[in-house]
Amino acid sequence: MKLSRNFNKREFNSKDGKRMPLQVLENIKILAKQIQAIRDALGAPIHINSGYRSPEHNKRIGGVKNSQHIEGKAADLATRDASPFKLYNLILQLISEGKIINGGVGIYNGFVHYDIRSTPARWDYRK
């Protein structure tokens, strides 16, 4: 299922193969539009490292109990064309310009977490 010009549902599926609930799919559709805007601004492909996580998969990989991934509201993003720092700052710029939802944005060594939660959150987990 195509969610935007460059993203398909399968890119957001849980890595354990569990079916995505309908409400989660509705959240993923909103999230994919935001990530499409990020990709368009970057002008380069973005890889979804992790999108939806079933509760079982989230627990198995050590995700937090109330992870936005379980609700289909989060994705971990990476690109070969920009460092996580550059991608993180691009997302913050798009938020400040009102072009994407002001949710959670976290930077890690190899990727950036972006989510569409209802309140802003920022963190830096680089080592």
Image (cartoon, rainbow, N blue to C red):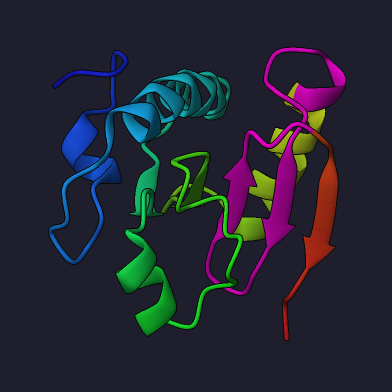
**Left or right: 119 with respect to 52?**
right
Residue 19 location (% of width, % of height):
16, 47
Q: Residue 100, located in which quarter of the rendered image?
A: top right
Q: Residue 59, located in which quarter of the rendered image?
A: bottom left
Residue 92 location (% of width, % of height):
79, 36
**Left or right: 85 with respect to 60?**
right
Q: How many badges with numbers are in the image?
A: 0
In the rendered view, would you say 36 is above or below 57?
A: above
Residue located 41% across and 70% down the image: 58
Q: Nearer the viewer, residue 10 or 93?
A: 10
Residue 117 location (% of width, % of height):
68, 37
**In magenta stretch: residue 114:** yes
Residue range corresponding to the magenta coloring? 95-118
In the rendered view, would you say 32 is above or below 92?
A: above
Residue located 36% across and 49% down the image: 52
Q: Nearer the viewer, residue 65 or 76?
A: 65
**Left or right: 114 with respect to 50?**
right
Q: Quadrant of the N terminus?
A: top left
Residue located 54% across and 23% down the image: 34
Q: Quadrant of the C terminus?
A: bottom right
Residue located 42% across and 33% down the image: 44
In the rendered view, would you say 95 is above or below 71?
A: above
Residue 66 location (% of width, % of height):
61, 61
**In magenta stretch: residue 71:** no
